[in-house]
Image (cartoon, coloured by chain):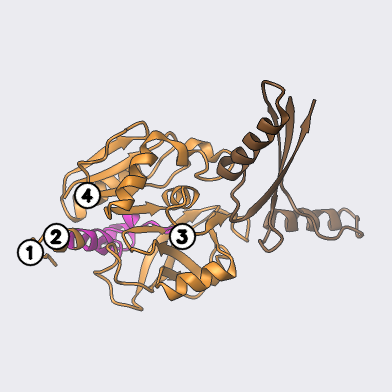
Chain colours: A brown, B orange
């Protein structure tokens, strides 16, 4: 199984990188660009085919390591 | 009093911390590798700055699971003195030993210069040698030092007197409420982005960091009934 994990900065936390990219896009002429937020995308391969177990494990991975839940949110999709 | 200076792959302020202990208070100090599984002989643990594990994923994210961190948790719970500086502060927040998180500076720049700090809490083990409200001159050197806590946690920090240092004047990184350092509720675990170990002699630009080290020696001596030194 393969999991796609998305880690994003919480809405109430500043994202200076996103702001800088937004500014660059405006400079390039993409005036229609609103807010830009930068996050992380991870692909995690998992052995076995027990989806419930995989979901429980992914939640634990996200809570403990992949995201810092003080400043980040996460979600994941399980394929296969 | 026995000091441990932790060494992770990518630590680069470990020698500064070691020398600062030697030069300021002359107490026994050891480098302790990230694989260590026993810290029982140490009274104070210094978690130094640097880029542990390349700062991959997030600063301090991977270091929190190094074997030695299990021992640091035990030491913190036992009331031993723990100081995290810069990357060490990031590691202690990732490990949940201190509240909050450190994110990218709002300027996106690596800020490396002297700053003025206000000592907000002079009752911790590491700050008892300062006066409350005293302004001290300590360098910063970080790209991810913007301290974040949500509003509810900020109110708790204020209520429990857990804000140890604030930036005086200019906020160099966008930290919430200008926070430069915090402690746990018990006050034995302190984390800060500025580098007191780099401010231990006039020739370095400031010796205001010396009292961080004399403070913890005093705290240890008071706890152990020995005569306090100035």
Q: If you read the primary sequence from the N terminus, does the residue marked by circle 3 or circle 4 appear first?
A: 4
The stretch of residues the image draws in magenta is B192-218
Q: Which residue is mark 2?
A: B221
Q: If you read the primary sequence from the N terminus, does the residue marked by circle 3 or circle 2 appear first?
A: 3
Label 2 chain ID: B
Image coordinates of residue B160 in percent, x first then y, are 41, 72
Q: Which residue is mark 3?
A: B113
Marks 3 and 2 share the same chain: yes
Q: Which residue is mark 4?
A: B43
For image coordinates 56% across by 70% down, the residue present is: B152
The image quarter in which residue B125 lies:
bottom left
SS class, disc 3: strand
For the residue pair B77 and B138, the one nearer the viewer reads as B77
Is residue B18 depicted above or below A47 in this figure?
below
Q: Is residue B43 left or right of residue A39?
A: left
Q: If you read the primary sequence from the N terminus, does the residue marked by circle 2 or circle 1 appear first?
A: 2
In the rendering, which numbered label is found on residue B152?
Answer: none
Q: If you read the primary sequence from the N terminus, does the residue marked by circle 1 or circle 4 appear first?
A: 4
Cα distance between the residues tagged 4 and 2: 11 Å
SS class, disc 4: loop
Cα distance between the residues tagged 3 and 4: 31 Å
- Judged from this view, the residue extending furthest toward the bottom is B133
Q: If you read the primary sequence from the N terminus, does the residue marked by circle 1 or circle 3 appear first?
A: 3
In the rendering, which numbered label is found on residue B227?
Answer: 1
SS class, disc 1: loop
Residue B5 covered by magenta stretch: no
Q: If you read the primary sequence from the N terminus, does the residue marked by circle 4 or circle 2 appear first?
A: 4
Residue B193 covered by magenta stretch: yes
For image coordinates 28% across by 76% down, the residue present is: B131
Cβ atoms at labels 3 and 2 below 8 Å apart: no
């Amino acid at each position: 199984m393969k999991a796609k994990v998305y880690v994003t900065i919480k809405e109430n936390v500043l994202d200076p990188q996103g702001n800088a990219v937004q500014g660059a896009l405006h400079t390039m002429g993409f005036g229609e660009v609103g807010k830009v937020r930068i996050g992380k995308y991870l692909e995690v391969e998992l052995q076995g085919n027990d989806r419930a177990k995989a979901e429980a494990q992914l939640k634990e991975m996200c809570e403990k390591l992949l995201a810092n839940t003080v400043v980040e949110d996460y979600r994941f999709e399980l394929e296969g | 009093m026995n000091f441990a200076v932790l060494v992770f792959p990518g630590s680069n302020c470990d020698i500064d911390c070691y020398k600062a202990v030697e030069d300021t208070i002359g107490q026994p100090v050891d480098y302790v590798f990230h694989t260590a599984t026993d810290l029982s002989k140490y009274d104070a643990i210094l978690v130094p700055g640097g880029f542990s594990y390349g700062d991959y994923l997030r600063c301090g994210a991977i270091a929190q699971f190094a074997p030695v961190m299990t021992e640091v948790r035990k030491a913190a719970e036992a009331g031993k003195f723990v100081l995290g500086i810069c990357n060490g502060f990031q590691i202690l927040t990732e490990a949940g030993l201190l509240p909050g998180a450190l994110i990218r500076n709002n300027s996106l720049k690596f800020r490396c210069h002297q700053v003025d700090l206000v000592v907000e809490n002079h009752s911790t083990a590491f700050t008892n040698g300062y006066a409350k409200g005293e302004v001290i001159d300590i360098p910063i050197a970080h790209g991810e030092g913007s301290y974040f806590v949500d509003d509810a946690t900020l109110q708790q920090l204020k209520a429990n007197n857990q804000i140890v240092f604030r930036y005086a004047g200019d906020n160099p990184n966008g930290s919430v409420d200008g926070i430069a350092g915090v402690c746990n509720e018990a006050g034995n675990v302190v984390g800060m982005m500025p580098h007191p170990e780099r401010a231990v002699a006039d020739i370095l630009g400031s010796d205001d960091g010396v009292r961080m080290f004399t403070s913890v020696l005093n705290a240890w001596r008071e706890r152990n009934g020995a005569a306090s030194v100035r």
